[in-house]
Amino acid sequence: MESALFLVNSVYHLLTAVNLKRRLLPQGEADLVVTNLLPGAGDLVSRLEETGLFRRVILGQSKELAEQYPMNREEAVSRCLDQRETLLRWSLGEELSPVYDRVFFPNFDWLSRLLACRYDAPEFYWMEDGFSSYVIDYARPDRAAVNRHPLGRQLRAKTRAALLYEPRLAMRGDGLASLPLPKLSREDQGLREVLNFVFQYRTPRDLPPVLFLEQSFRAENIRGNDLELMELCRQAVGPGNFGVKPHPRNGENLPQSLGLTRKLDLSVPWELFLLNQEEHVPTVVTVCSNAALSGRLCLGLDLPTVMLYKLYTGRVLWKEDPVLLRYLEAFRRQFAGKHYYVPQTVFELGSVLKYLGGQYGD
Amino acid sequence: MEIKVSVIIPVYEVEPFLERAVDSVLAQTLEEKEIILVDDGSPDGCPAICDRYAQEYPQTVRVIHQENQGLGMARNAGAALARGEYIAFLDSDDTVEPEMYQTLYEKALEGDCDLVMCDVRIRYVEENREVEVASYSREEVDLGDYIAHGNNITYSVNKLFRRSLWEGIRYEKMLFEDIALIPALVTRTHKIGYVPRAFYNYYRRGGTISTSQTGQMVDIVRAFRTFLTTCDPLYKEEAVYAAARQLLWNMTQSRTLFLPDFIGLLREFEADFRLNPYLKQDPATGKVLDFLDRPVVPQRFILAHCRRPLPPELEKALEENFPAAQRVELEEDLLSREDLPENVGQAAKLGRWQYVEEYLSLKELWERGGIVLAPEACPRLTLNARRMEPVFFGFENTQELTTLCFGAVPRHYVVQALLQSYGEDHIYNRAFLPLADRLRDFLITRFGLNMTGKRQVLAGEVTVHLPSVLAYDLHDGDNCCKRGDLPAPEGFEVVSGEVLAFWSQRLLENWNLYKAERKKKAPGKKPPAPKAGGGTISQAQLEEERRKVAALYEESTSWKVTRPLRAIARLWKK
């Protein structure tokens, strides 16, 4: 019987992994590693075990590895790779199967790289991590010291393909094949039930018609005008029609403290909300949150979405990386659908929100 | 008595000056003269003054009363009645020196001349100074050289004409009738005499045709055109050079408002100007050729009005300020054009007529250029100055642009890009947003327009003006077009609160800048301390100071501009 190992670091990965297991390996044996990079991973692990979907569900300690062994420092890279088996055992707490046919990993992080050192036989597949998977060649030698180490390079060497929801948008230029991932489907009742159970989903109440998805800029110490943009949106649609979904990594809910939003009952993952909510989905406004794209990417939905990346003033990757910007443009042109807006000025933003809010009369 | 010289004086609204003019002719040393006063329907006391002179001097003075037809027509009427061997013209607010006509007449006889001229003394009345302008450099006139290099060639009034020369020749009904007729007449006159004395006193005052600007003054272009087409072909090169000198002066000094029209004229005669040998030898005047390369917005007004008539106020403003302009009215019937984007047809079905009008305007602007006016616009003559800008727009305030008035040369890429955007699947078309929104975002994203409300020139040729230029009249003399549909009482102007705040801020910034500059120039200098007045100030002194401050406020622009707001505030208080 075919066996597989899935690694997940985020909700997005987990949704993809669950869907992939159900669609690709319905009868196969699969183990799942949920790392502690995912907030609330402990609770998720026990509920995932209850679903019986996976043979084993393991809580992985990935956070500490990343902190202790910076991948761009050669000495740290060597130390980590020298004690790879010890670290692997420490990270996973229990032994994995001696053999897997396929390993699905979402990031070129330590856990994935150490597994690549251990397993010779299986094929490795890189699962989509959001739009960065379309544009960034994480294994490029000049990107980090780990990519120049013979053992650090193992993961890239063993990776057969990148699995993307929209492979035609890939522009990493790394020579790696991109294969399609099956999309999450609202029609898949079983999938919805599993995920709703795992995340203890309950329908959010009283969501505003326009929802701003905050990003982790403050957590990453990036200074920009996202709060000003929120205020502009609030003014354009009216305070009662606007709310902000805070980013968990930012700590304090600053938009709420500043009076930009009331507290929203929206703790469930955005993708899961979209999977469940077939009507009255708010218009999403965001600087460049992956969640805003994921409705289109992993569910194939054409939802009203307003992307503000052209109006954001902070120093962020898509401003400095032309490939990322090219990806966003390609997404807009080839894939985004009729309800996807990228205003180029704050005035245009006002017009778009008024239009979406029906303030122009039709 | 055989009349040697008939002096023709057209009369119109010159009550304070008429007697001075007539008396200066009566005082001529030449006795065999007649004076023909042509009352051109003057509405003041002039007709009575004319009649009185006719009564007092029945042998010398004759009067014609006619309906107002303009200076040229009045002169024609006088010339038709003249009996003298020679005729002369005098403007009724000028004077002539006592020996003028006798001296010129004797010179004419002596040389058997068809035309004799003298110099002109220009008296700048307000400035209390005078200048004598010599008509030519030598007493003996070389006709070709005079046409090319002489002065005062366009004047009717410093010349004595043989009456027979006048047969079959008449002034046209226009302003600048002198320019249209006299220089061409000079080219066809084979013998010209010259007396180098300033016999003619030309009084230059404010508010006269020489010093004020009206839309009808575009006649000056027509006048030069007539000159160049009716001059003797034998002297065409000299005539073109003479015209070039005068045009350059008018284009750069005297009538800059009509610069685009002058350039149009230069283009009509481009071969004559470019190949002119005099211009090749005279780099200073040759600069006129540089203007041939300047882009000019055609004087065409594009007026789109679907399902609504043009307001009579707009028609009147166009008639008064741009009598020679072409008007293109765009109406609903143009919607049958095959190249119409789907969105425009859809907008028409939904009754979004502003969207349709703006599209049609842009289409016309792209194809043939011109100035687009919304039906609410009230254009002024100063709009002509904008025609030297290849593409121009204006701020409505610091957040918006206005589409009340904008313009472009034909086939300009900015207009093309805007036009093309009507075919795109975009918010502007989905929501049928006004052109002002589309334009603002376009200029911000493509040209980096700063939404400051301040004048900017983008990519060297796209001008975006202050709100005072194409939206509101802030009484600073800059306004070219304002809203005509928001009437204000006499002496008041309509201005949005936002623009008023912006304008006040701007004045303050300018004032601070001025103070900073002044401080930079004289760093140690402190403002003069008030004079000691024995330790006390009288009540009268205090009152005088108060009056000065109040007067200063009343005269200040910002105070005037805020007057309507203050009036409203007073009403509210009540």
Image (cartoon, coloured by chain):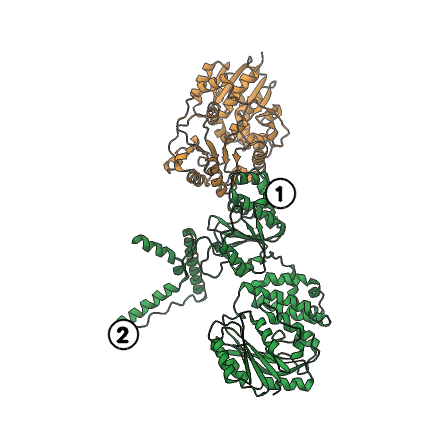
Chain colours: A orange, B green
Q: Give the class, few, some or many, for how many residues have Cα within 10 Å of label 1's Cα (few <14, many ≥20).
A: few
Question: Marks 1 and 2: in contact by CB < 8 Å?
Answer: no
Q: Nearer the viewer, residue B421 or A188?
A: B421
In this view, B413 is above or below B99: above
Kindly identify which chain the residue marked by label 1 belongs to: B
Whether residue B96 can be seen here: no
The alpha-carbon separation of the residues under discs 2 and 1 comes to 85 Å
Name which of mark 2 and mark 1 comes first in the sequence. 1
Question: Closer to us: mark 2 or mark 1?
Answer: 1
Residue shown at 58% from the left, 80% from the top:
B7
Residue shown at 69% from the left, 72% from the top:
B238
The picture quadrant where one finds residue B146 is: bottom right
Disc 2 designates what residue? Answer: B534
Q: Looking at the picture, how far across and down is residue A166, in whole percent?
A: 58, 27
Q: Nearer the viewer, residue A301 or B431?
A: B431
Q: Is residue A350 left or right of residue A259?
A: right
Whether residue B300 can be seen here: yes
Residue shown at 41% from the left, 67% from the top:
B524
Q: Looking at the picture, how far across and down is residue B242, in whole percent?
A: 66, 71
Q: Nearer the viewer, residue A274 or B67?
A: B67
Tell me, for residue B337, which label it has, or none: 1
